[in-house]
Image (cartoon, rainbow, N blue to C red):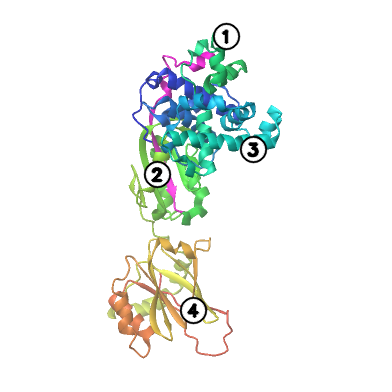
Amino acid sequence: MTHGASPQTASEFGPTVWTAVTVRVAWTLMMRGARVTPPVLKDARDHALLTLGAGVAVDEAEHLAGPLTAEYLSRVAGNPIRRIRTETSDLDVVHEGWRRGLAPALDPVADAMLRLHFGDGMAVEAVSTTAAINKEQLDDAKERLRSLVRTMAEGAGVPAQGWPDAKVDQLLTRLANTAEPGCPQPMDVLSDRNRTHVDACPRCSRAVRLIRGGVIAPSDLIPAADSGGAVSTTTAAVILLHPDARRVQKKLTKALGQGAVRVAPDAWLMSSGELGAQGDSIRRLVSDGVVPRHHLRGAVVTGNGRWSGGTLLGPIAVDAIETARSRPWAEVDGMGELPPPRPAPPSPAKWWVTAGAMGVMAVIAGVGVMGPQEALPNVPIQANFIAVEDGWEVTFDADDLAVIDVVSLASGGLTIVHRDIRSARGQWATGDGSYRMYVPDESMAILASEHGLDDLPLLVEQAGSDPIPMQALEAAVRSVHPTVAWVGSPAITVPDIPTGESVSAPTLPEQ
């Protein structure tokens, strides 16, 4: 089903659609225990009409108004927003003639089953209590109704004999809720001359019960001339957080401000104005390294919908979330590509060390400037290796945008254990910002680079023929890629190092 164009006034739906949707919305709200106040009725009806769109047929509108009202209640309750299934497919064969054809075959038990169970959604046990009918009789009537509607569908060319009971029950539910033709005008629905029709028509029968129960007024069934607020267009923004960064949900929620509504485990919905107002907060969160930029993305979408407090009505909420999921990570509509993190400030301890060692540095400076300068890694990495049975457990930390490669040496020679890992490193996350992995080989090394090493397989193959392959590979990497960070497991040269003892690996100096 498509949403269709957004009409300008509620009258464009047609009075019959307006009446049918209002009755079904109010009835669904009441049956689900919601207090049907005028604002609630208006919001729930607007949500259904906005989602249905102009030009919808009355039968389809009435059928879908029930599940759309249930979705409205779910949104108000703060549950995740999801697209509901609105296709009616082969159940569209139902029409009012079927209901009239079925009526002569119904005894009082089957009639109660059709009206109360399939029409009003009451459980069989509740029907038994309400109608004072034995449950076994109701179960038998249910099977007879299934058989009757299968035969009726076959007569219309629909192969319903092969349908499972659950699908036949859906057809019976659609049939039990299909209005009789010739419904009276809303203001005449209470007239005695229409009593026969009202008793046979689910829509009019519910309208009468709702009016007499004080749930709605007859005027609610007529679209007012100024009720165009039901059909609005708005612009909504969505921010999505990668599941690997869920540990910063609270910080992101605070940065987005009170105008952002969390509508899924990793999705925040807001107006486009709210997104613009919080743009600096989002950029600061990324540049400060609180949230890696490749763990955020967002979209701004215009479509059918309107805000009611903290609830966004209409299909635009789902459309915005689905659009955001199609955006690349690190990009938010209206903000462009998110900034890279700022370099971490130097530790104050380094200044004290520098001051204390100034005399020594003055002596070696002259020698240092005459010798070759060692290039510093672009993306430093820190790692701690623990020797465990048959391998190494390593805990490491590196820049969020660094590409990680892992190589190891075993009896079969050098091998690449992990290749070109960036966002996928979340599989090793410990929850405190660092990462931990296990490599079951005699030695290993972790490489961190800005863009990955295209020639790493070739370097591994060449080093594999060296008597000391891991050292040969390290020398080759440092020669060809001087700015790549390399940390390797320490050599165990004495046999009495117990398994599980922590051995810190030397790391390259930080940039």
Magenta span of residues:
217-242
The amino acid marked with disc number 3 is Asp
**Nearer the observer, disc 4 or disc 2?**
2
The amino acid marked with disc number 1 is Asp
The amino acid marked with disc number 2 is Glu
**Nearer the observer, disc 1 or disc 3?**
3
Residues at marks 3 and 2, CA–CA distance in whole angstroms:
43 Å
Disc ID at residue 139: 3
Residues at marks 1 and 2, CA–CA distance in whole angstroms:
51 Å
Image position of 127 (left or right of 480)? right
User: For mark 4, what is the residue?
Assistant: 440
Instruction: Indicate the position of residue 475 as horizontal and vertical percent values.
Output: 33, 82
Label 1 environment density (alpha carbons within 10 Å; few <14, some 14–19, many ≥20): few
Instruction: Locate the C terminus and report the quarter of the image it occupies.
Output: bottom left
Residues at marks 4 and 2, CA–CA distance in whole angstroms:
41 Å
Upstream in sequence: badge 4 or badge 3: 3
Instruction: Indicate the position of residue 405 as horizontal and vertical percent values.
Output: 38, 71
**Nearer the observer, disc 3 or disc 2?**
3
Label 2 environment density (alpha carbons within 10 Å; few <14, some 14–19, many ≥20): some
Upstream in sequence: badge 1 or badge 4: 1
User: For mark 2, what is the residue?
Assistant: 322
Instruction: Locate the N terminus and report the quarter of the image it occupies.
Output: top left
Please report the residue visible at 39 percent of the width from the left and 43 percent of the height from the top.
Answer: 279
Element assignment for label 1 = helix
User: For mark 1, what is the residue?
Assistant: 192
Upstream in sequence: badge 4 or badge 2: 2
Residue 44, visible in the rendered structure: yes
**Nearer the observer, disc 1 or disc 2?**
1
410 w.r.t. 105: above or below: below
Residues at marks 1 and 3, CA–CA distance in whole angstroms:
35 Å
